Image (cartoon, rainbow, N blue to C red):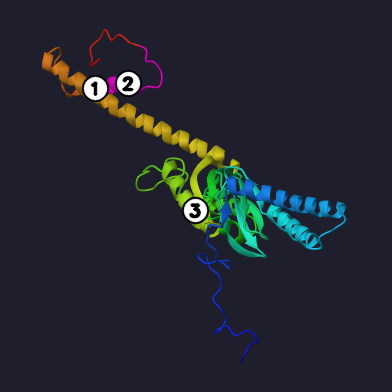
Amino acid sequence: MTTGLDLQNAPDPVGHTGAAVDLTEKPAWSAGAGATGLAIILAILLPGIAILGFMSSVAAGEPNPILLPVIIILGLCGLLVLTMIRVVSPGHTLVVQFFGRYVGTSHRTGLSLVAPLCSTKRVSVRVRNFETNAIKVNDLNGNPVIIGAIVVWQVADTAKATFAVENVNEFIYSQAESALRHVATTHPYDSSDPITNPSLSGSTDLVSTELANEVAARAALAGCEIIEARISALSYAPEIAQAMLQRQQAAAIVDARETIVEGAVSMVQTALEQLERREIVDLDPERRAAMVSNLLVVLCSDTNTQPVVNTGSLYN
């Protein structure tokens, strides 16, 4: 059975590490302000001199037929020179094309000349940043969380940024959101052991580094480098926020109780040891148990205890 599409001989599809447009930035010829000024002067001066000579010959009644073609040629050369002039501000580059073919990139700023008959596109290489939308994703434990990030980036390869993707700004933005979703699903919102199990809320530096690396891997296709990526918003989704808050409060209460009990036991032990060492009172097991119970109640109680004076015997 055969089909109209030969799958065995079909070319390999473009994958994550490939690109349909494979270009790398290279330098383009350009001249500085001095050469540009000289070219402008010559483009204006030479046709002017030829025109004056032609007008003088006409006024003298002996026009020189050679001057008219010379004037036309010099005028065309002057127009050609004027089309080569570019003004580039700092933080910008010029991607130069010659009838659709990529020639190179000029990083020269100020007044400059580029190759004749070439079109140019201004590309910014300044540092830029944006903040993603606060998106809802499920963390490693399946809990829905709201998360957002700030990404700082800049164009490193102007050729790829211009020709490899349709719109570099939209590309970086969408890839950043995709990377943020993936990183958020690989970590829990919080963790009791942030060393062995890094969490989104407790290991922000580690999560930010993972996010920056993943966005950088995706942005390399567009010739962009990621300078920094940081989590800017992180919270539980509204539908579980109240329940998670109660759980966090309960965990905090348990941790506090453990600390209080541990401290109370240490204080009781110290008190009994000092009473025995100083021989203030001789405590039998029953009295020791009663004192331990009273001291623990006093030290572990949520409210202030009221003193009660016992005027009778301990055994009555």
Marks 3,2: beta carbons within 8 A: no
Q: Quadrant of the C terminus?
A: top left
Task: Write the residue at 42% across / 40% down.
Answer: 202
Span colored in magenta: 293-306
Label 1 or label 3, whichever lies nearer to me, is: 3
**Does residue 257 appear in the picture of this structure?**
yes
Q: Which residue is mark 2?
A: 299
**Does residue 283 appear in the picture of this structure?**
no
Q: Name the amino acid, label 1.
A: Val
Q: Name the amino acid, label 3.
A: Ala
Q: Which residue is mark 1?
A: 268
Structural distance between the alpha carbons of marks 1 and 3: 58 Å
Q: Which mark is residue 216?
A: 3
Nearest to the observer: residue 309 or residue 169: 169
Q: Label 2, secondary structure: give it.
A: helix
Q: Which mark is residue 32?
A: none
Q: Label 1, secondary structure: give it.
A: helix
Structural distance between the alpha carbons of marks 1 and 2: 9 Å
10 Å crowding of disc 1: few (<14), some (14-19), many (20+): some
Q: Is 267 colored magenta in this rendering?
A: no
